[in-house]
Amino acid sequence: MAEPVRARSDAAAELRVDGARLLDRLTDLAAVGAIDGGGVCRLALTEHDRDAREVVVAWMHDLGLDVHIDAIGNVIATRGGRRPDLAPVMCGSHIDSVRTGGKYDGTFGVLAGLEVIETLERAGISTDRAIAVAFFTDEEGARFPPDMLGSLVYAGGLDVETALDTIGIDGARLGDELARIGYGGPFPCPGPPPHAFVEVHVEQGPVLEAAGITIGAVTSVQGISWQEISVTGQSNHAGTTPMSMRHDAGHAAARIAVAVREVIAAVGRHQVGTVGSLRLQPDLVNVVAGRATLTVDLRNTDEAELRRAEELLADAVATIASDEHVEIESRSTARFEPVEFDERVIALVDDTARTLGYSVRRMPSGAGHDAQMLARVCPTGMIFVPSHKGLSHNVAEHTDPADLEAGANVLLHTLLALSTESALLDDADRGAPAQIGERES
Ligand code: HGY
Ligand code: MN
Ligand code: MN
């Protein structure tokens, strides 16, 4: 096991980010796709996503970074290091949002990365390894499932042509939308693996705030299972059709939603489940629904328990189909097993937070993140900061500026430690990959 990575103790040790500058960028970006209540709506590859990309790419150019756009629209901006022969250290997250997004989900990880770069620039600090800041396409998966689509393609977990052919919930083809907003880039996927990847993100849950702790050293991400379930019954008159003759897709869908809660109770422990979308057709007061489409999001930190939840739900759906005399089809739209982050990176985040004087605890992530995809190709970790009242995917999402600044400082010093020549596995041990944007032949 390689030696633990230690935070640097030279002049850079005193460096701190400029919290006000970071907050200004977060506020400016939140104006793109702004909605009532202080949140944002920037579904992937819409005009608002494009406009947000333009703002962030302009900041990347202002900082003199080398900006690369790959074939799925991931954007990677790199500040060169003294050793171009070594793979860069990467940070980043996403700037797309759900329909009722908060202003920090994803954007904090990208803009904290730019703040780290600007802090190093202004201090005249260079690093052995280049430092890259990325935003990945369609992290939310809300329009084009699965979630973390762009980083999954970057990490080689999904073929780019298959990803480009993804059809969204609105019937649009991902590749067409990417071309329409002008972000189908020239650089091939999968991308070159960085030396290490660190993502700072708001927790999106209640744990840190309840414990009065500033930093989360994230140990893992729970498993995710998304299904789209289609129910086919028979539309009929709401008044004249005897109950015994109905093939009521609406009632069947409602029973499936109840079954999700029953499955959660049966599996217990960390199992969670959500029916976030439920659409009936023809969706009229006096017509027995002929069709229903609903989504089920199941998550668990334990893979075996997640599988059991899926099996129990499948059994319940079969019973409901038979009882209600309807046809039911389930289509998996995302399936990721739990991911453990690299112990050395977790320990470095933990140590760095303590060295900087912040309270810190180790914890799993309930939400999916791009980091879980980068973990497939390089040592990876995450840094959490508290979410007020645990709210996220909600316009009222909030994190105190002091906590944002703390998270960005931990990112700064974690990246500095990782950017020294042999911080983790030496590239020679892994076959030094090309720099971002180049490919070995
Ligand atoms: O689905 C998730 O957990 C993330 O917000 N994409
Ligand atoms: Mn996110
Ligand atoms: Mn999110």
Image (cartoon, rainbow, N blue to C red):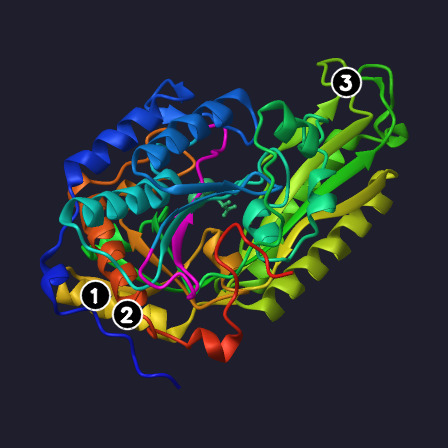
Q: Position of residue 30 (x, y in %)?
A: 34, 26
Residue 75 position within the rendered picture, expressed as x and y whole percent measured from the top left: 48, 41
The residue that mark 2 highlights is 348
Q: Is residue 77 left or right of residue 167?
A: left
Looking at the rendering, in which quadrant would you find the N terminus?
bottom left
Residue, disc 1: 352
Q: What secondary structure characterizes most of the magenta part?
A: loop
User: What span is colored magenta in the figure?
Assistant: 81-100
Tell me which amino acid carries mark 1. Thr
Secondary element at image label 3: loop
Quadrant containing the C terminus in the rendered view: bottom right
Tell whether 213 sits left or right of 10: right
Determine if the C-beta at disc 1 is less than 8 A from ligand 2.
no
Q: Are marks 1 and 2 in contact (CB under 8 Å)?
A: yes
**Which residue corresponds to the image point at 63% horizontal and 37% vertical from the top-left?**
144
Q: Nearer the viewer, residue 323 or 79?
A: 79
Q: Secondary structure at mark 2?
A: helix
Q: Of the residues under marks 2 and 3, which one precedes in the sequence?
A: 3
Q: Is mark 2 within 8 Å of ligand 2?
A: no
User: Alpha-carbon distance for marks 1 and 2?
Assistant: 6 Å
Amino acid type for the residue under numbered disc 3: Pro
Gap in angstroms between the C-alphas marked 3 and 1: 56 Å
Compare residues 302 and 18 and report the one nearer the observer.
18
